[in-house]
Image (cartoon, grey):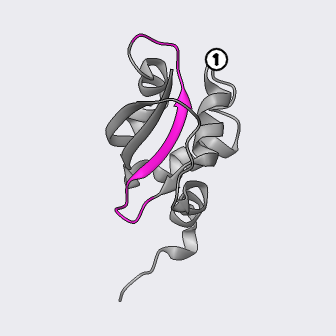
Amino acid sequence: MRYRVTATLKTETAIDLHRKLLDGTILKQKPDGRAIVDAMNRAVVKETGEVEFSMGCLCSTPLAHERATVFDKHFDDLVTEVVQDRQEHVGRPFMDYLAELSDPSRLTHSQ
């Protein structure tokens, strides 16, 4: 089945998620690493702040392995909805958002 997924990013784990998406940690995960990385590359951040993406899964419980290994560590309030086809998602590219959150220069120090 194919699912549309909405979730809220745990900002405290954003840097870790970004690193794992870029360094191959998630990509190497079997059997779903490639699907997770591809989904995150297509994901968007909506105006509400929710992250939205779509991906396929053959599990009886939607995204069971993906949730156990990646999603539940980095997202809250994950909701899946069955859809028929690949979805177009409108919003800011999620990977750009993660890159911004991971940029050490964004941290300001008040004195």
Residue 35 vs 10, above or below: the answer is: above
19 left or right of 109?
right
Q: Residue at x 55, y 42 (%)?
A: 87
Asked whether 93 or 109 is in front, the reply is 93
User: What residue lies at 43% left-to-right and 48% top-to-bottom?
Assistant: 13
Across and down, in percent, residue 52 comes to 46, 48
The image quarter in which residue 98 lies: bottom right
Residue 107 on the magenta segment? no
Q: Callout 1: helix, strand or loop?
A: loop
Q: Is residue 62 visible?
A: yes
Q: Is residue 19 visible?
A: no
Screen quadrant of the C terminus: bottom left
Q: Residues within 10 Å of mark 1 (few under 14, many from 20)?
A: few
Span shown in magenta: 46-60
User: Furthest-top residue in view?
Assistant: 60
**What amino acid does circle 1 point to?**
Lys
Q: Residue at x 65, y 33 (%)?
A: 25
Q: Which residue is mark 1?
A: 30
Residue 54 belongs to magenta span: yes
Residue sitting farthest toward the front: 84
Residue 38 sits above or below residue 107 on the image: above
Residue at x-position 63% and y-position 16%:
31
